[in-house]
Image (cartoon, helix red, strand yellow):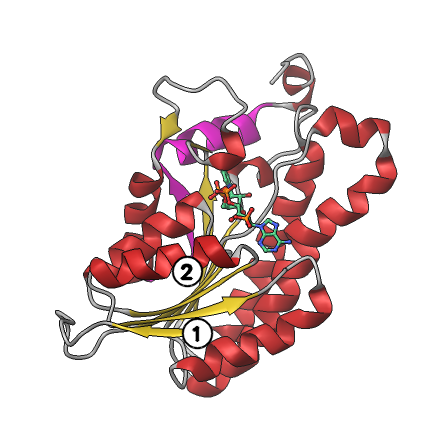
């Protein structure tokens, strides 16, 4: 379905964005900022009603045009078709944001290891396959940005979240290689590493305190990193310092910690 704004786009040449996992709290905040600058946006997600409501909201906020595509990213075999539809919606994409994922219950997975396969598939295999489908198109276009939300959890394996961390760490390595591949085509590959963000994903956790960020702050960091053509962004910025310390801890000391 395509919704068009009644000739009130504030920009004469709005950029084209595609958001995979468009109902994610972080993605919604990014989409709102893109809409305010008059972008044309493709929203892809599995909850059609939420996507449709978001499309209406983005038009009110200034988006020039919004296209909705239904997609379940757990069905990896369908990602090629989803990318094809997203790419052709506006005859190319300037910014592709891959924002979907799931935060598993680590203890439950340790008790039932067979369930790890689906978690790794959604958080690592699926975004990697999707990004590869995008990569060949961006390579031909010779411009644009592939931005993928990983996590600070991917920086060092810790007992509290090493399964989710394995998926996100694997995705970080994948993006590092994809960035190397796409460098010659001048395509930016952005690895977004948030800390604690107040979205549906974390609503079961005790919130508050200086380490927690609202999605809009993360969205602002993401779009600034896109503008500055960064390779990796920690958001908020202080997570780079925290993870620098965590990663530098000698193993004998690290093993005595409990986080
Ligand atoms: N929140 C944090 O503290 C935090 C920290 C570091 C990294 N991240 C990462 O940031 C990204 C965005 O998460 P968020 O914080 O914005 O959480 P969120 O609001 O819960 O968003 C997660 C999104 O993933 C979508 N999704 C899950 N499985 C899907 C599937 N099979 N097909 C299609 N969509 C699917 C969900 O769709 P539905 O809306 O249909 O459920 C939801 O919109 C994730 O990759 C997450 O791992 C989050």
Give the side of residue 162 with respect to residue 31, left or right. Answer: right
Residue 11 in view (yes/no):
yes
Give the residue number, with chain letter if any, for mark 1: 1
Q: Residue at x 63, y 76 (%)?
A: 80
- Crowding around mark 1 (Cα neighbors within 10 Å: few <14, some 14 to 19, many 20+) is few
User: Does 139 appear above or below 116?
Assistant: below
Q: Which mark is residue 50?
A: none
Residue 70: in magenta span: no
Task: Give the mark nearest the N terminus, 1 or 2.
Answer: 1
Of residues 232 and 220, the one nearer the viewer is: 220
Q: Position of residue 9 (x, y in %)?
A: 16, 72
- Crowding around mark 2 (Cα neighbors within 10 Å: few <14, some 14 to 19, many 20+) is some
Give the residue number, with chain letter if any, for mark 2: 52
Q: Position of residue 155 (x, y in %)?
A: 57, 39
User: Does 235 appear above or below 94?
Assistant: above
Of residues 69 and 222, the one nearer the viewer is: 69
Please state, as top left, top right, bottom left or bottom right, where the C terminus lies in the image: top right
Gap between marks 1 and 2 measured at Cα: 9 Å
User: Does 193 appear above or below 78?
Assistant: above
Q: Are marks 1 and 2 in contact (CB under 8 Å)?
A: yes
Residue 138 in view (yes/no):
no
Residue extent of the magenta highlight: 229-249
| Image quadrant where residue 250 sits | top right
Of residues 73 and 52, the one nearer the viewer is: 52
Of residues 72 and 255, the one nearer the viewer is: 72
Give the secondary structure at mark 2: helix
Numbered-mark total: 2
Q: Residue at x 25, y 63 (%)?
A: 59
Q: Residue at x 71, y 62 (%)?
A: 75
Q: Residue at x 76, y 48 (%)?
A: 118
Q: Position of residue 229 (x, y in %)?
A: 33, 62
């Amino acid at each position: 379905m395509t919704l068009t704004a009644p000739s009130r786009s504030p920009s004469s040449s709005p950029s084209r964005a595609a958001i995979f996992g468009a109902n994610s709290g972080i993605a919604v905040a990014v989409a709102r900022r893109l809409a305010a600058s008059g972008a044309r946006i493709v929203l892809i997600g599995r909850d059609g009603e939420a996507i449709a409501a978001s499309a209406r909201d983005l038009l009110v906020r200034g988006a020039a045009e919004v296209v909705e595509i239904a997609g379940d990213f757990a069905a990896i075999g369908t990602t090629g078709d989803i990318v094809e539809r997203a790419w052709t919606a506006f005859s190319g994409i300037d910014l592709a944001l891959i924002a979907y994922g799931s935060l598993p219950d680590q203890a439950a997975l340790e008790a039932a290891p067979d369930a790890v396969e689906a978690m790794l598939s959604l958080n690592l295999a699926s975004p990697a396959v999707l990004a590869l489908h995008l990569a060949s198109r961006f390579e031909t276009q010779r411009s644009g940005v592939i931005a993928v939300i990983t996590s600070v959890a991917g920086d060092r394996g810790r007992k509290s979240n090493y399964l989710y961390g394995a998926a996100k760490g694997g995705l970080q390595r994948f993006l590092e290689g994809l960035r190397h591949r796409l460098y010659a085509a001048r395509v930016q590959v952005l690895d977004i590493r948030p800390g604690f963000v107040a979205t549906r994903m974390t609503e079961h956790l005790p919130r508050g305190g200086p380490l927690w960020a609202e999605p809009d702050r993360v969205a602002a960091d993401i779009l600034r990193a896109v503008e500055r053509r960064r390779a990796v962004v920690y958001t908020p910025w202080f997570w780079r310092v925290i993870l620098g310390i965590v990663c530098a801890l000698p193993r004998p000391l690290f093993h005595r910690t409990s986080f």
